[in-house]
Amino acid sequence: MSDKTRPGTSRDERLKQALKANIARRKAQAKARARDDEADSGGETEESGDG
């Protein structure tokens, strides 16, 4: 443990990376759902805007 300055740093980095990956995955899922909804409705949506 002499090479680490703080024992919690690696955990914090892991959590940060996991959160970043989770957000990216959710964004991709939301984008895919929006695309599917747009295709189902013929391109017209009731709501407008990026959200």
Image (cartoon, rainbow, N blue to C red):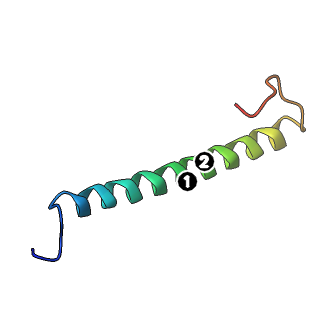
Whether residue 8 is situated above or below residue 29 in the rendered picture: below
Residue 39, disc: none
Relative to 39, is 4 on the left or the right? left
Relative depth, front residue between 37 and 28? 28
Q: CA distance from mark 1 to mark 2?
A: 5 Å
In the rendered image, the vertical position of residue 47 relative to residue 30, given as above or below: above
Residue 9: give x, y in percent of width and height: 24, 60
Q: Position of residue 1 (x, y in %)?
A: 9, 74
Farthest top residue in view: 46
Task: Kindly indicate the quadrant of the structure image that contains residue 30.
Answer: top right
- The residue that label 2 is drawn on is 27
Q: Which residue is mark 1?
A: 24
**Image coords of residue 18 (percent x, y):** 39, 57
The reply, left or right, for residue 19 in relation to residue 44 is left
**What residue is at 90 percent from the left and 38 percent from the top?**
42
Q: Nearer the viewer, residue 26 or 10?
A: 10
> For mark 1, does the 10 Å Cα neighbourhood hold few (<14), some (14 to 19), or many (20 or more) residues?
few
